[in-house]
Image: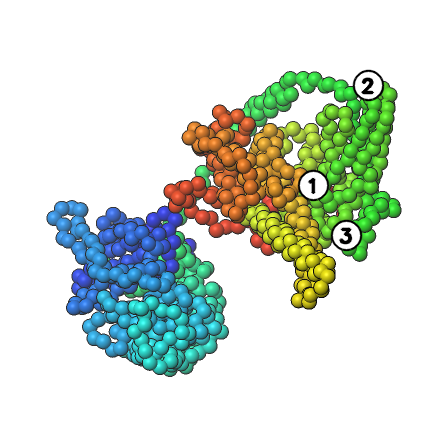
């Protein structure tokens, strides 16, 4: 343990999953006891206000019940707390609490208790100001040199300074050129406000100039804010520091001149009252908070600086005097007098760790106990191993107890994909680019057991894949006859197909099998842990096998491009382990379902549908206008006494050009919509695959998901993907995934139409994932709604069905996919990679 660790005097953890920032901590004698003992005031973004008076029995004790003087929930998020003389007619200290749309001033008082429970504390609202603009931060002081009271200045999110003279509003002024608000402080020596603009400039504004200036930007103000009049707002001085500021502090001690301290992202600056740099210090670590305080040496100032490495550095001017380790990253630091102990350092983290500590080097006396060694009984271990081997052997014997009855079909279909590209490409009329597009030969074999007549074989593949021949007819096939047909497959468009599976259908009404196309044969090369694929459309997908864990990582720039490779990887893994005789092999997906990227594809597809509707309506209007102009011209030409055309011919030519342009736009939008629908189907298959791996769904449950998410082969304006899928998901949520019988009794609308937006669909998709994560089971019976109590790992943020449920859900800010879309799958890593031999 480090000798330079901050010595814990008292500590506690505030609330559960609450958030805090640098303005949420304050130390002051808020209850006006007059004994010089500070109280710790903490406000949170959840609206909780707490006041502590620590009394540890011994150093390092946690918080006791009597240490918490007051805890009250103010409902609105607390941005900042300050203590000052904020009430007129008295010089007692009061507590100012800044909310986003309100400023409240309270008095804190204690009542002496007569029993062992101790004193009782309460707060009383003295006054409040409702803000017309959203607040960012505030500062206070004796603005204008007033005596015996403090005024408050609030900075709004749009750069307006609002000054309050205790119970009354004084004036409001916009800072010139303000884009984003920065830290704000008040200097009583110069009677000025100091802030840092979004241009990375430290700016100083005199209070008197603010009071008599007019608005620089001429923005609209309320009647309450139009009291100021006079000259234009002019800055007193500026200094460019070249970085964004985290905090500003004004210090003025007896033994040192007044200084302005600015904490930047990489440096901290000490400025004179006129804006000149006194000194600056480049920091080695990213700072999180700071606090200048009085130094024992004359003419110097000490500064506490906390950083994101959980360190607290103490500087005397620019010299590092001490460094100490903290158990958390501080976002606010204060120094005060607690329980007759002066110079206590109080730190607060963003997740509510509040600690009072002091600096010291007393070593820890803790020693790790010796580990007791025990001898191993190898005879017992041998017996245990034999018992386990018997259990494993019995389990293997019990599998596949029921024999499978094989049934001969009248017709058998098999397909074989050539492992190599055609020597002469059969691709014609391609749209990929200048590169030569290869083709691959596929042979389909029909073997019939009985005599068949007029056999028609139809082949279908997903666009933009194209066949050189898709239909074959045989007038008669004798019993035990074999026919083989061959054709080539190639890529015509510049985008990727949603899958590489093809359908071979015979008019003879029997179910057919589907066989996936392979990329290439396995080779005898050494094992590699990374492999890249470049599709003909230009996109790339990379597969990485972990060297230390049983995981595969698949990543790509486009989310929908992950579908084919992910599905092929699972097929190769299954085939490999089946050949090895491993029957309990499973693939799993432990990450979060990437719904955000999926929703972006849905929104793009829906936007193209809406754009197509608008273009068709506009084309219809121009066509009606074109026919009307034609009729007018025809009437003029048939008239025996010709009249002037009055520019009807010009109008006809312009309308004709508009009709042609709109027709081209409609055709282009249809092409884009077709490509978008293809990409959406790819992404949908990937999401279904991930949900199946995530929740370990059976084949029947995956079939239900495919029926719900992929109901259409083609997308039309009359019946689109969004409304069809939304209706299917609503049926699942109100039947097998319902929470109660009341939801099952609800009826769905029988009419489908294009929705106004995709919010309802995205809500239902997220709710479906949430119900599955809570133990829901997909089935076609409404009586099989399973209790949703089990929570699976991973998952996604839920979208509630009601306002009550919405307030109870906390949004998760983490995202799985960033610049490179990637997936993580857990699976045993084979000794020989099943993807070997796959080339670009």
At 26% from the left and 51% from the top, the residue drawn is 71
Task: Locate residue 603, reporting x and y percent.
Answer: 57, 49
What residue does disc 2 label? 450
The numbered mark at residue 348 is none
The first of marks 1 and 2 along the sequence is 2
Q: Which residue is drawn at 48% across and 32% down?
A: 747
Q: What residue is disc 1 on?
A: 499
- From the image, state whether disc 1 or disc 2 is nearer to you: 2
Count of marks placed on residues: 3
Q: Could you say which quadrant of the image residue 22 lies in?
A: bottom left
Between label 3 and label 1, give the one nearer the viewer.
Answer: 3
Q: Are marks 2 and 3 in contact (CB under 8 Å)?
A: no
Residue highlighted by disc 3: 431
Front residue of this view, candidates 230 and 56: 230
x and y percentages locating residue 319 in the rendered image = 41, 73
Height in image: 252 above or below 521? Answer: below
Residue 754 on image: x %, y %: 56, 44
- Is residue 543 among what the camera can see? no
Callout 3 environment at 10 Å: few (<14), some (14 to 19), or many (20+)?
some
Q: Earlier in the sequence, mark 2 or mark 3?
A: 3
Residue under the point 61% across and 34% down: 707
At 50% from the left and 30% from the top, the residue drawn is 736
Whether 661 is drawn above or below 671: the answer is: below
Q: Which of 200 and 322 is in front in this view?
A: 200
Rounded to the nearest whole Å, what is the CA distance between mark 2 and mark 3?
Answer: 44 Å
């Amino acid at each position: 343990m480090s000798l330079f660790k901050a010595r814990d005097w008292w500590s506690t953890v505030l609330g559960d999953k609450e958030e805090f920032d640098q303005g949420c901590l304050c130390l002051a004698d808020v209850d006006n006891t007059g004994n010089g003992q500070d109280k710790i005031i903490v406000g949170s973004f959840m609206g909780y206000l707490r006041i502590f008076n620590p009394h540890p029995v011994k150093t390092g004790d946690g918080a006791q019940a009597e240490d918490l003087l007051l805890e009250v929930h103010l409902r609105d998020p607390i941005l900042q707390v300050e203590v000052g003389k904020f009430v007129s007619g008295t010089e007692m200290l009061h507590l100012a609490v800044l909310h986003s749309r309100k400023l409240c001033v309270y008095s804190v008082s204690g009542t002496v208790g007569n029993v062992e429970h101790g004193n009782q504390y309460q707060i009383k609202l003295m006054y409040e100001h409702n803000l017309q603009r959203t607040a960012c931060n505030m500062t206070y002081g004796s603005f204008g040199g007033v005596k015996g009271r403090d005024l408050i200045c609030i900075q709004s999110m749009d750069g307006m300074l609002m000054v309050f003279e205790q119970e009354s509003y004084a004036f409001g002024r916009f800072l010139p050129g303000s884009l984003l608000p920065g830290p704000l402080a008040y200097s009583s020596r110069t009677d000025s406000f100091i802030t840092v603009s979004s241009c990375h400039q430290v700016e100083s504004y005199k209070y008197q100039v603010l009071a008599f200036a007019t608005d620089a930007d001429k923005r609209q103000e309320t009647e309450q804010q139009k009291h100021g009049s006079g000259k234009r707002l002019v800055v007193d001085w500026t200094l460019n520091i070249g970085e964004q500021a985290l905090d500003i502090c004004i210090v003025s001690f007896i033994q040192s001149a007044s200084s302005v301290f600015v904490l930047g992202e990489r440096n901290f600056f000490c400025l004179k009252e006129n804006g000149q740099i006194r000194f600056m210090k480049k920091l080695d670590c990213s700072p999180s908070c700071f606090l200048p305080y009085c130094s024992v040496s004359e003419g110097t100032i000490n500064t506490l600086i906390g950083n994101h490495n959980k360190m607290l550095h103490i500087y005397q001017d620019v010299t590092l005097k001490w460094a100490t380790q903290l158990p958390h990253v501080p976002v606010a630091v204060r120094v005060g007098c607690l329980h007759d102990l002066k110079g206590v350092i109080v730190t607060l983290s963003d997740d509510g760790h509040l600690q009072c500590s002091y600096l010291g080097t007393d070593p820890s006396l803790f020693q790790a106990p010796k580990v007791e060694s025990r001898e191993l009984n190898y005879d017992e271990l041998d017996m245990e191993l034999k018992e386990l081997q018997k259990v494993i052997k019995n389990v293997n014997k019990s599998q596949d107890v029921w024999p499978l009855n094989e049934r001969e079909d009248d017709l058998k279909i098999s397909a074989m994909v050539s492992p190599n590209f055609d020597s002469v490409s059969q691709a014609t009329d391609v749209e990929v680019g200048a590169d030569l597009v290869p083709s691959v030969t596929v042979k389909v074999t029909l073997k019939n057991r009985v005599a068949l007549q007029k056999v028609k074989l139809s082949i279908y593949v997903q666009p933009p894949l194209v066949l050189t021949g898709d239909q074959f007819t045989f007038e008669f096939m004798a019993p035990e006859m074999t026919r083989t047909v061959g054709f080539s497959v190639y890529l015509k468009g510049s985008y990727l197909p949603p899958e590489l599976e093809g359908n071979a259908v015979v008019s003879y009404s029997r179910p057919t099998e589907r066989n996936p196309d392979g990329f290439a044969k396995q080779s005898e090369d050494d094992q590699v842990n990374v492999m890249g694929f470049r599709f003909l459309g230009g996109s790339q997908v990379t597969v990485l096998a972990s060297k230390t864990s049983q995981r595969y990582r698949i990543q790509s720039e486009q989310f929908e491009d992950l579908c084919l490779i992910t599905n092929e990887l699972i097929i190769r893994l299954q085939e490999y382990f089946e050949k090895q005789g491993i029957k309990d092999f499973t693939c799993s997906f432990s990450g979060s379902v990437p719904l955000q990227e999926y929703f972006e594809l849905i929104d793009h597809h829906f936007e193209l549908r809406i754009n197509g509707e608008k273009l068709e309506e506009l084309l219809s209007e121009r066509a009606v206008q074109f026919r009307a102009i034609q009729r007018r011209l025809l009437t003029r030409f048939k008239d025996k006494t010709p009249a002037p055309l009055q520019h009807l011919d010009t109008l006809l030519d312009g309308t004709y050009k508009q009709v042609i342009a709109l027709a081209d736009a409609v055709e282009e939008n249809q092409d884009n919509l077709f490509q978008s629908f293809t990409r959406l189907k790819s992404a949908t298959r990937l999401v279904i695959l991930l949900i199946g791996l995530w929740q370990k769904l059976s084949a029947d449950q995956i079939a239900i998901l495919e029926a719900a998410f992929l109901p259409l082969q083609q997308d039309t304006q009359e019946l689109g993907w969004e409304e069809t899928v939304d209706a299917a998901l609503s049926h699942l949520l109100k039947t097998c995934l319902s929470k109660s019988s009341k939801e099952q009794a609800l009826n769905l609308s029988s009419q489908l139409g294009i929705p106004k937006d995709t919010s309802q669909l995205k809500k239902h998709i997220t709710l479906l994932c949430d119900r599955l994560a809570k133990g829901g089971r997909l089935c076609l019976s409404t009586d099989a709604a399973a209790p949703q109590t089990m929570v699976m790992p991973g998952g996604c943020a839920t979208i509630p069905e009601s306002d009550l449920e919405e307030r109870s859900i906390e949004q998760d800010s983490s995202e799985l996919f960033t610049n490179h879309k990637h997936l993580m799958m857990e699976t045993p890593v084979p000794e020989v990679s099943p993807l070997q031999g796959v080339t670009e």
